[in-house]
Structure formats: C-alpha cells, structure tokens
Image (spheres, grey):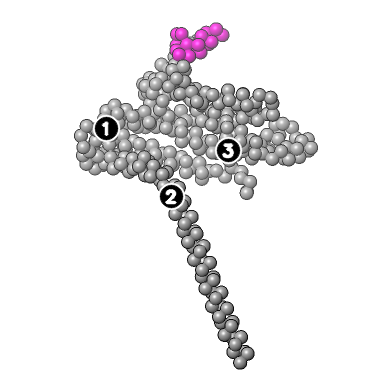
Amino acid sequence: MENEQRMVDNTQNGGQGRVATRQQKGFWSRLRLTEEIEGYLMILPWLIGFLLFTAGPMLTGLGLVFAHYDILSPPRWAGLANLQRLLRDDLVMVATLNTFVLTILSVLPRLVIALLLALLLNQKLRGIGLFRTIYYTPTIVPAFASVVLWILLLQKDAGAVNYGLRSIGLPALGWLTDPVTAKFAIALMTIFYFGPQMLVFLAALQGVPLQLYESAMVDGAGSLTRFWTITLPLITPAIFFNMVVLIVETLQIFTPPFLSTMGGPMNSTTTSVMYIYEQGFGSLRMGYASALSWLLFLLILLFTTLQFRLSGWVHYESN
C-alpha cells in the first residue's frame, strides 16, 4: 500500500511539474511575442517612411524605365525604347567616365587630409575642442555658398588663385573654362568637405589601446614605426567605412559641377546625376532619366560590392 501511495504521489507531482513547465513556456512565449510587437511598433514610422519615400519611388522609377513620360501627360508604354536609346547615347559613357575621374581625384585626397587632421586633433592640448570645431566648420557651410566662393577664387582674370600664380611667375589658368583643369577645379571644391571623415578617424584613433604604444616605445619604436605597425592597421575599419561612403557620395556628385560649369566646357564636367537631371527636368524625358538613374544605381551597387569583396586588408579585433 505504501508503495502504491508513493507512485500516486509521484505521478501527481510529475503532472504538476509538467503543468508548471507548460505555464512557464507559455509565459515566456507571450513575453517574447509582446516584445516583438513592441519592436515592430517602434520601427513602424521608419518602415512607413521607407516604403513611401524610398521603396515606392524606386519601384515607380523602375516602371518608368519602360514608359514615355513628360510629366505633362500620363505615361505611355515604350517597351525597351529607353534602354535601346541608353545603349546608343554617347553622352552616357562621357558622363560616366567624368564621374569616375572626379571620384578618383576627390576621394583619395579627402581621406588623406581627414586622416592627417584627425592625427593632429587627437593630441591632448588645451583648447583642442576649439580647433576641432574650426576644422569641421567647412562641412556645415551650404554647398551653394561654398561653390560660389570657389567660382570667385578660380576666376581667370580676377581670381585669387590666379593672382597667386602670377605673383610667383606662373601663367594664369582657365580653371573652369579649360576641359583639362575643370575636373581638377571641381575636385578641389569637394576636397574640403572632410569633416565627417575626420570625426570617424578621430573616434577610431581614440579607440586604439594605449598599452600597444607603450609597449612599442619600450621596444624602441619611433613615431613613424608606431603609426605604420599599430595605428594604421587598427584604424583600417574606419578607413574602409570612409572610403565606401565617399565613393558612393562622389559617384552622385551634382552641385559643384552644376553651379560652376553647367557640365562644360565641352561636357568635360557633365556627371551622371547632371545628365539624369538634364534629361528628366530639362528635356522632360522622365522615362529615359529613370533608365539612367537605374544604370547609376547598378554601377554604385557593383562598386560597393567589389569593395566589400576586396576588403581582406581590413583588420578587425576579432581577427
């Protein structure tokens, strides 16, 4: 009898344990579901904005690739006409090459200048915050005002840059009127927007462990050796991030060439975005402009993917 009673008690206790376990699982499931719902509600404003202002326009633009649309009348089906025109248009290749050249001329100097200034501003000096603010200030100047200032500086007859060249016996250059120098002038206008990259480098430099520098100094490593063997490898993630962002940004360059040269002389500064603008809002060929926009999007996607595939030189702490 006692054994039978124990078996009954054990069965009852086991049943109660299983019930408690099921109750706990149900509680945690409800809690997880509640957290998931709250998370989706938190990102809902962003999600709605993304669908309305990013995904929606992109899908609309993809539809316009296969249509004739001049804004003034409803879109008309065009089939592959816009894509065929894109393949025959010589200015597409000209604008694409100009964009690549400006990217090459602009990205590397901006990275180098931003890194050098970050190294200087990483010193523990009195008033260093003021210097950081001063060097960041050009970034917050409106693009229109900055380009107008550069136009005045680069004028052939009365510009300060040519005045400086004449003062040392060099000939004045037609910075914005010569096809060769115009690209360098546009690149020069963009180089001084290094503020965001400088801040990223500064944050990366402050994250380098001081113990590594101390160990290297004990071993007799000089400043240059410490930079090449410690600083540079450990900030490669910041270099890679800045490089990707700058390339994507410069491939979409518009304001400096549009305001200073309008794509001239002889289309030497016509960029991809400028040509899209000209076709869409100048000639009211919205379907063709959409095809050009998707071409630029695919090129940016290709180059970004290529950079990630070739990112083996980036050193991460987990490696």
Q: Residues within 10 Å of mark 2 (few under 14, many from 20)?
A: few
Q: Nearer the viewer, residue 105 or 7?
A: 7
Q: Which residues are magenta?
A: 152-170
Nearer to us of marks 2 and 1 is 2
**Residue under pointer 1:** 285
Which quadrant holds residue 280? top left
Three-letter code, disc 2: Leu
Residue at 49 percent across and 63 percent down: it is 29
Three-letter code, disc 3: Ala
The answer to whether residue 132 of the structure is visible from this angle is yes
**Residue under pointer 3:** 238
Question: What is the number of callouts on the image?
Answer: 3
Determine whether the residue tagged by mark 3 lies in a helix, strand or loop: helix
Q: Residues within 10 Å of mark 3 (few under 14, many from 20)?
A: many
Q: Nearer the viewer, residue 265 or 186?
A: 186
Residue 94's tag is none
Q: Position of residue 165 (x, y in %)?
A: 53, 11
Q: Nearer the viewer, residue 62 or 132?
A: 132
Rounded to the nearest angstrom, the CA distance separating label 2 from label 3 is: 33 Å
Nearer to us of marks 2 and 3 is 2
Apparent side of residue 181 relative to residue 73 in the rendered image (left or right): right
Label 2 vs 3, first from the N-terminus = 2
